[in-house]
Image (cartoon, helix red, strand yellow):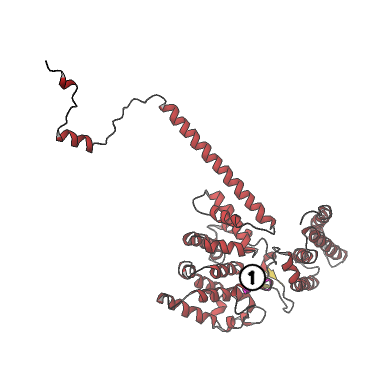
Amino acid sequence: MDFMHYFLPTTMSDSEMASSILTDRTFTSTIPGLGATSGKAVKLVGSVVVNGVEAILIRRRISKLETIFKLREEVYCKANYEDLLELSRSVYEPSIRKRAFRVIMGIVGGMEFEDLASAVSEWHLSESYDLLKEMALCFRLENGPEEYVNILSSQISTNLRCYGMRRLPSSYIQRHDADTSMEVPLCNAFLLFIALVISFSENSSFSKLVIHELDMLTFITQTFPAILYPNSEFNSTTKAPLLLPAKLVFRALLEKLDPTADSLDAPSIAQLEVLLSTTVLNSISLVSENDLRVSILSPWTRVRLGVNIPSSSSKEYVHNLNTVSQRYRYTREFRDSHHGTRQFGYWLSIAYINNQEYGRATARTRTLAREYAARQALALLGHCILYSRTELWQQIIAFPFLLLCSTTTRLACRRNTYR
């Protein structure tokens, strides 16, 4: 009996070999193996823990960013702006996105947006579009029909409140050469931000997005119809400067678009040239005709638009002390002209804001600025209460403000290390 075939390798037929090569199926049993249930539990618990830790870290980060930008500290890190933009993306939960977006609105409204504009210009174009579209929507609905405003009234009003937090009350400013106060358009700071992002952009892609996707030219002409009408009230020397942000946006777009590189830009360029040639925009002078960015970031531009001068640099305050003093003089004249009227609380709040900025410019420290602003507000308040022209209900309303000012004064005197 031949036993050798037990030790020789078994040969496979061609069909069997082809079947074994081409078959990649895995045969599984319906009976769970050892540890299957515990493995699923460990995986589930692990996913919950990881997601929970990520959520905690994200919430801590957005809370820290809110604190940093609320305190308006002097030195900002580029990573803060990058994280803020990242947290505003649609991939995060709505509560995180809303908080990040409101911080961004506050930065833009306060016009301390140079670093933010630089970060947006370096961001992905689609992400920049989503952010700016949401910002523009707030102003479109704010000026739109009432039925559209009511749809998102709560969310839009909150965003605009964050945006206007650092502006003068009700976005009004009193001109020393005007008989009446005039309204400063709420979207002006947003337009300056758009103009600055355009100037930071490296090519014409962002400018095309602003014109075609955001339809910013239509938005501006609808917000400021005076641009298209030569006999408008904005032709006056006092109201024409309010159209300065619109002119800066048009100029920034015109500088970035190149008809030789893309013939499709020719109609947009022609439209911009027509808008800039209008009487009202042609009469507005810029701080620097050669450097558009200087005109956008100039403190004088902020003053003309009724926005508080930012506290990002003590040296900048010293250099622009005359401008701040001029605003302070405007406020005093406004106070004298509205003394003892219904706008008592309004002029007092403006006086406090302007005195605070004036104190920062002279004292160079926030501690001394607080003390100075509080003492000046106390003096103004006491002066108003002592006069008989002030009604009793106004004195009652002013009393909590008096306590607030006195408390601020005491705290400012004690905290001499806060700069």
Q: How crowded is mark 1: few (under 14 residues within 10 Å), some or many (20 or more)?
A: some
Residue 121 appears in view:
yes
Front-most of residues 7 and 148: 7
Q: The N terminus lies in which quarter of the figure?
A: top left
Determine the residue positioned at 63% across, 52% down: 65
Q: Give percent across and percent down for residue 222.
A: 53, 73
Q: Which residue is tagged 1?
A: 297
- The kind of residue on which mark 1 rests is Leu
Left or right, 12 with respect to 241, comes to left
Q: Which quadrant of the view contains residue 405?
A: bottom right
Residue 158 appears in view:
no
Determine the residue positioned at 70% across, 73% down: 181
Residue sitting at the far left = 1
Q: Give percent across and percent down for residue 75.
A: 67, 58
Q: Which quadrant of the view contains residue 298?
A: bottom right
Left or right, 342 with respect to 85, comes to right
Q: Give percent across and percent down for residue 280.
A: 59, 82
The residue range painted magenta reads: 294-301
Q: Is residue 310 above or below residue 271?
A: above
Question: So how many labels did they put on this image?
Answer: 1
- Element carrying mark 1: helix
Q: Which quadrant of the view contains residue 266?
A: bottom left
Left or right, 116 with respect to 271, comes to right
Q: The C terminus lies in which quarter of the figure?
A: bottom right
Q: In this view, does 129 lie above or below 278?
A: above
Determine the residue positioned at 49% across, 37% down: 47
Q: Does the magenta stretch include residue 298?
A: yes
Give the overall secondary structure of the magenta segment.
helix
Q: Give percent across and percent down for residue 292.
A: 59, 75
Q: Is residue 327 magenta?
A: no
Left or right, 100 with respect to 266, comes to right
